[in-house]
Image (tube, rainbow, N blue to C red):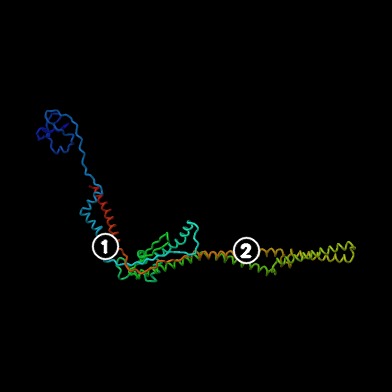
Amino acid sequence: MSETRSSRANGRKGRRSRSLVAYDGDDDRVVPLDLDMRAERSRGELQPHTDRGRELEPRTDPEPAESEEPARRPIGAVLPRMADSAFGITSFVIAVVVPTLLTALFYMFLATSQYSTVSQFAVRGPAGAAGPADMLGLFATTASSETADTYIILSYIHSRDLIEELDKRINLREIYDRPEADFYYRFDPTKPIEDFVDYMRTMISTEFDTFSGVVTLTVRAFRPEDAQLVAENVLAASERLVNELSRRARDDSLRESRAEVAKSEQRLRLARAMIATFRGSESEIDPAAAAAAQQGVITQLEGQATGIESQLNALRQTMSASAPPVVQLESQLAAVRKQADVERQKVALERGGTTGTALTQRLTRYEELLTEREFAERAYVSSLASLEGARLEADRKQRYLAVFVSPRSAEEALYPQGLRWTAVVFGVCLIVWGIFSIIIAGVRDHFV
């Protein structure tokens, strides 16, 4: 059959019966069509016919109707359906209601009351310390001294060293293993120190106000007197640490100054010892004084020679050269000049043959030793002044722990805050349940 067309005998004026036939294009035979066959063929292949002998006329096939696909629902619309379903209700009860109910029952009937002690302190310096001149200097001084020491104290409060020290002093493990404590908040004393440090971070909390420099210390325990005892020992240990830090800073500041003083003192001693050795070896207390005395002798001899020469010139004008007074004055003049030459040679020549040194050499060596001693004395005086200044500066920068809110015994238990933690558990479980519900609904919607 080359071309198949469908015809329907549909009476428009009251006829309701329809016949489905097909005509062969070669011999115009009528071939009945099965209804199953019609379903398998496309809509355009079957056309209705009202007359058997009428020629088949082509007609335009109607546009096929758009296939109706199931509309996908958004994930947000599926979640309420899932929540209304049995699975959603069951999961909500298991994931949200049950944990919240168990938490509420625990804090209502099982959780032990915890008492807290609050204390406030600050790390301060001497009241008379001069402040910085500008705001930048104020910030730098605060950040480098008091604030830095405060952060050290905060780290020390939550450190293993403090926990071990408190455990030795007040038996800290026994305090947090009281018989009245519940199983959740009680600490097992057989656990290692690392677990105990983590546990104490939940029982000892600190808050630091960077603007005022005030630290708020909160200590919790199962008995009010235990909380007060732990807080007092924490403050005492922190104060010892501040004093130790202040002492170390003072020693570090003075150590270099003291070392410089010791070096200058040693140098001064060495200079004085060298002068003493020189005096012993040269047998002279002061070569400068000896040189001055020697120069005085030479000057005196030269003066005498000048006087004798003037007298001799006066006699030569009235007497002959062979006159006894002239000969006597000439002899005296020659002797004085010879003595002056001898004294001059003592200054420049070595003394005592090969064992001594010339006066000029001794004087030069002595002046070098004096210069070294004077410089050592000045350096020593300057180092002493630096040491005194460093000591005053160290005293000015000394730190101490100022406790202005002392620990007091609590009268009412403020912890463990059961209502708050019940609400937290409910919120967390609700969020987790909602996230998983959205994920499951999205997966289901993708396969629908």
Give the amino acid type for the residue marked by disc 1 in the picture: Ala
- Quarter the N terminus occupies: top left
Question: Residue at the spot x=62%, y=63% of the render?
Answer: 375
Return the x and y of residue 356 as percentages of the image width and height: 71, 67
393 w.r.t. 45: above or below: below
Question: Residue at the spot x=50%, y=58% of the render?
Answer: 133
Residue placed under numbered mark 2 in the picture: 375
Return the x and y of residue 245 as percentages of the image width and height: 46, 65
Return the x and y of residue 447 as percentages of the image width and height: 23, 47
Q: Is residue 308 left or right of residue 289?
A: right
Return the x and y of residue 358 as percentages of the image width and height: 72, 65
**Front in this rendered view, residue 211 or 289:** 211
Residue placed under numbered mark 1 in the picture: 104
Secondary structure state at the residue bearing disc 1: helix
Image-quadrant location for residue 273:
bottom right
Give the amino acid type for the residue marked by disc 2 in the picture: Phe
Q: Is residue 314 left or right of residue 404?
A: right
Question: What is the crowding at mark 1: few (fewer than 14 residues within 10 Å), some, or many (at least 20)?
Answer: many
How many numbered discs, if any? 2
Question: Residue at the spot x=67%, y=64% of the render?
Answer: 367
**Front in this rendered view, residue 240 or 121:** 121
Disc 1 and disc 2 in contact, CB within 8 angstroms? no
- Is label 1 or label 2 in front? 1
N-terminal of the pair, mark 1 or mark 2, is 1
